Amino acid sequence: MTIALTRAVSPSLARCELTHLARNPIDPTRAAAQHSNYERCLAKLGMEVVHLPALSDLPDSVFIEDTAIVLDELAIITRPGAVARRAETASVAEALRAYRDLAFIEEPATVDGGDVLMVGRQVYVGLSSRTSASGVAQIRQILEPLGYWVTAVAVDGCLHLKSAVTPVAPDMVLINRHWVDGGVFHDMRLVEVDPTEPYAANALRVRGAVVFPTAFRRTRDRLHDLGIAVLPVDVSELAKAEGGVTCCCILVER
Ligand code: CIR
């Protein structure tokens, strides 16, 4: 059984953090409808969706991925790089306590979960505007004694490592090579996003299928041609807040 921990869209989503996109009006009701549809998609894939209530004063709290990294042995509660997002972690820690022992990223280090990509026991951590070198060092200190291998990866031009690269099959990653060096993933097959769809590298692989934004048709066709089962979801309103498909859930294996 896999739990997908999600958080309802905050009514204040329009006041979200923005790094690379210009601010455009966001309709929180439309975003909430898209988010519910995303949750239904996860449920159809066999996940048990555990839905946390909205936090009205924390605009970005729907992007729950950034608050924790869950492994079989424990969960690491992050210290998000954006000061305005730090208060999001407390209630996620409470929710995860039911399933895992907890470790915490301590100040002054910062880590966003969107920078942490796991392939088996290999953990890639993006060095981004949100995740600091001392954050990577703390993750290494927690995980290497448990038999994980932690590699820091430079990220340039996008918000998080997983904006630039995500797994789409056991041996394959979807990548935008303008934002991350593909050489880091030398033991994997690389599928590049369509050049007209730079934001398309964020895909959520669950149960052998890939949940993927409807907006990126050309990249979707590339995945389809490789025999990958793609489940399209419309997340256009969440994308205005720089959110993608990985960032709206935390997966917990039970
Ligand atoms: C932020 O800037 O923190 C949010 N507006 C977007 C976070 C997206 N998180 C993710 O992709 N993991």
Image (cartoon, rainbow, N blue to C red):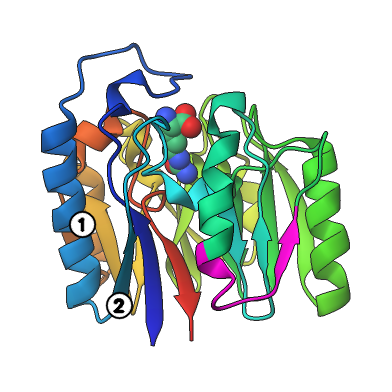
Q: Quadrant of residue 40?
A: bottom left
Task: Classify mark 1: residues with Cα within 10 Å, few (<14), some (14-19) or many (20+).
Answer: many
Report the span colored magenta: 95-104
Q: Quadrant of the N terminus?
A: bottom left
Question: Camera-side residue: 85 or 45?
Answer: 85
> As shown in the figure, which amino acid type bears the numbered disc 2?
Met
Residue 39 lies, in percent from the top left, at 22, 61
Name the residue tied to disc 2. Answer: 47
- Of labels 2 and 1, earlier in sequence is 1
The answer to if 216 sits in the magenta stretch is no
Question: Camera-side residue: 173 or 215?
Answer: 215
Q: Is residue 55 above or below residue 138?
A: above
Q: Secondary structure at mark 2?
A: loop
Instruction: Please tell me which residue is depicted at 60% across the width and 36% down the height of the picture.
Output: 86
Residue 48 visible here: yes
Q: CA distance from mark 2 to mark 1?
A: 12 Å
Residue 221 visible here: no
Instruction: Please tell me which residue is depicted at 17% across the width and 76% down the height of the picture.
Output: 44
The answer to if 103 sits in the magenta stretch is yes
Residue 91 lies, in percent from the top left, at 51, 53
- Count the marks: how many? 2
Question: Camera-side residue: 163 or 169?
Answer: 163
Answer left or right for 54 relative to 171: left
Answer left or right for 84 relative to 53: right
Q: Quadrant of residue 155?
A: top right
> As shown in the figure, which amino acid type bears the numbered disc 1?
Tyr
Q: Is residue 39 above or below residue 216?
A: below
Image-quarter location of ligand 1: top left
Name the residue tied to disc 1. Answer: 38
**Residue 168 numbered tag:** none
Q: Quadrant of residue 37?
A: bottom left
Task: Classify mark 2: residues with Cα within 10 Å, few (<14), some (14-19) or many (20+).
Answer: many
